[in-house]
Image: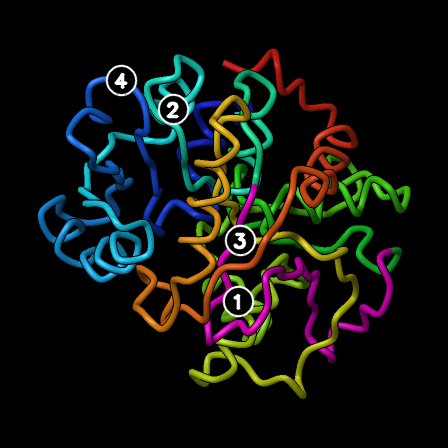
Amino acid sequence: MPITRRHLLATAPALMAPALLSHAGGARAADGALTVGLIPSEDSRAMIANSQAMMDMLSRSLGMPVKPFVAADYNGVIEALRSRRLDVAYLGPFSYVLGASVANIEAFAVAETKKAGRTNYHSLIVAHKDSGIRTLADLKGRSFAFVDPTSTSGHLFPKAGLLKAGFDPDKAFGRVIFSGSHDSNAVAVQNRKIDAVAIADRILDSAIAKGQARREDLVVVWKSDPIPESPTVWRKDLDPQLKKRVQAAFLEVKDIPWSDQGLLNGFHPTNDAAYDVIRETARVLKLDLRGMK
């Protein structure tokens, strides 16, 4: 399956989290309200209701009304940022890099959940201990499961890692499948239905906690560099004073439910350079970010 901008934006790892947008200029600024948009991962009315704690906290910090708005998808968010109809957005790591290649935007904050306790995660290649696989070279001729063609930690990062190690995943494996989910990969490698799999470390931890896999039965063959979590971004041309207020407001948000990712510890400052690891991965995979449609 070809990797396109639409595929990457539509299936970015942050897809199930709220996409936060503000509008600080134009007609909406006249009524003194900050408009916050949401990418729906559920019924739009339920999404708005579930985001109310976030809206209330931002409103108190900014000292102005904050109103939710449900957006259609990441493609619409990027286009709205580019056309200056939106000012702030929450994007996935790859969708941010794609957006930054066509729009004048910059990352300024990143969320940390209580469950993760950090603002990054890793992609792993894992095999069953009884498979005899201990190194990437041992994968030659074996069966392998990625997650989805557009999964950051379930395909793009492990594929780039294999290529950088001199292992051609398009030719060297005996059989390659896309399982469709990280959980499926955990179960498949535990039950020796597949020789080795790609999986996010936090999802492997969750699968082990749920009894789907046993850590003592598995061998980590490869581990990626840290992958930054999804950033909150703003248009670079926003008023500097507004940027300070918006970032301060986000950094005060904490201890509320964060979509399907659990309780939010809080936001931390970040910057564009933190996502250079995403750009490097795109270069290894020869993804033309500007040319994607």
In this rendering, is residue 249 above or below 191?
A: above
State yes or no: discs 3 and 1 in contact (Cβ < 8 Å): no
Structural distance between the alpha carbons of marks 3 and 2: 20 Å
Structural distance between the alpha carbons of marks 4 and 1: 52 Å
Structural distance between the alpha carbons of marks 3 and 1: 32 Å
Which comes before the other along the chain, label 2 or label 4?
4
The residue tagged 1 is: 188
**Among the 4 quarters of the image, the one containing residue 211:** bottom left
Which comes before the other along the chain, label 3 or label 4?
4
In this rendering, is residue 222 above or below 178?
A: below
The residue tagged 4 is: 26
Residue 134 at what x, y percent from top left? 84, 70
Which comes before the other along the chain, label 3 or label 1?
3
Which comes before the other along the chain, label 4 or label 1?
4
Helix, strand or loop at label 4? It is loop
The residue tagged 3 is: 110
Helix, strand or loop at label 3? It is strand
Q: Amino acid at mark 4?
A: Gly
Q: Amino acid at mark 3?
A: Val
The residue tagged 2 is: 75
Residue sitting at x 53%, y 44%: 151
Residue 220 at what x, y percent from top left? 74, 71
| Of 71 and 204, the residue lying toward us | 71
Which comes before the other along the chain, label 3 or label 2?
2
Residue 287 among those drawn in magenta: no
Q: Amino acid at mark 1?
A: Ala
